[in-house]
Amino acid sequence: MLHYHLSAIILSLTMYILLGPTASGKSSVAFNLAQELNAEIISIDSMKIYRGMDIGTAKPSVEQRQQVRYHLIDIVNPWEPYNTSMFLKDCDDAIAGIKSRGKIPLLVAGTPLYLKVVLHGMFSGPGSDESVRKSLESVAAEKGSDYLHRELQAVDPVKAGQLHPNDAKRIIRALEVYTITGKPISSLQTQFNKQSLRYDAKVTGLRRAKTDLHNRINVRVDQMFAKGLVKEVAKLVDSKDGLSREAAQAVGYKEVISHLKGEITLDAAKELVKTNTHQLAKHQMTWFTERSLGVPIKWVDIKGDDSAADISRRVLGHFTATDIHR
């Protein structure tokens, strides 16, 4: 516990949001905050939803989950389909349930798109064109999602900048919308602005120097492999139902799958996981801006030797201040 004297918490506040890139220290800070704020944690993470994908997604420990209630972790089997609209419903249900118990939702966000739809709702774009989609999927299978990402960069640089080159599903959707309408999907997503916020929230972000975050990512990846990431992935791949396309694209899993297929060495897989995690962190910070999310963000700049307790106190100060972000 932080032993921090709280000012009166504003009960009309819908929720708190803690965001930041992978390895920034969100999990330990959120655990501390939940106990101080009488909050329950909602994980805004597109990979922590999958059962059995534990080591590579850095889920909270069993001990932490016994002390604090977590939501939207281990809710889907890794072979089952899951999409953004399903996440939005699950998150809305979790928020309502937490508030009905007289507690405050604390959203811990690592997946920018999921957070964005929680704040603003789903984009109502044109329906799918099967022929266009199949054509794009064929190109992705032949030339890779990187190639389609470059195509998207040419017609919609804003959206391309928001999507990871490995995010084939959303890259294909963006190109499909452009092909059907002749307009960039980013120009059609007009509901993503401050006026359309679905919840009142206070948003605080964790920010580290590039070198510090780089080193923390490398240490985390080494720890994941030491804890048995390869064994975890092998068990998932060898299971009866295997992994869905989305689950198999998760950073840490995709690279190990390549190793298990004999395509790359174990050392190469580990280095590739580090490289791709660095890219993921960069992508997250590109989206975690007031302009992209349409909501004010107060940042806590962290030094390498700052303790989780100290960081938690600073975040708590932002959350319990009297200026509500609406």
Image (cartoon, rainbow, N blue to C red):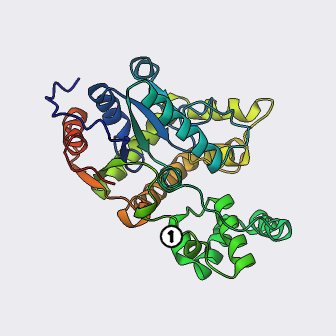
Does residue 205 lie above or below 229 as drawn? below
- Where residue 196 appears, as percent x and y from the top left, is 46, 60
Q: Quadrant of the C terminus?
A: bottom left
Please name the residue that numbered disc 1 is placed on: 161
Please rate how many residues cluster around mark 1, counting C-alpha atoms within 10 Å: few if below 14, some from 14 to 19, many from 20: some
Q: In which quadrant of the rendered view does residue 24 lie? A: top left
What kind of element bears circle 1? Answer: helix
Q: Which residue shows up at 48% across the image and 36% down it?
A: 95
Say whether residue 121 is left or right of residue 201: right
Q: Residue 260: x percent and y percent?
A: 69, 41
What percent of the width, then of the height, locates residue 44?
Answer: 49, 43
Horizontally, residue 48 falls left or right of residue 194, namely right
Please name whichever residue, 52 or 299, is drawn nearer the observer in this view of the structure.
Answer: 299
Badge 1 amino acid: Gly
Q: Nearer the viewer, residue 166 or 72?
A: 72
Name the quarter where the N terminus is drawn: top left
Q: Residue furthest right?
A: 131
Estimate the x, y position of residue 22 in percent, counting from the top left.
42, 47
Confirm whether residue 73 shows in the render: yes
Q: Is residue 143 above or below residue 116?
A: below
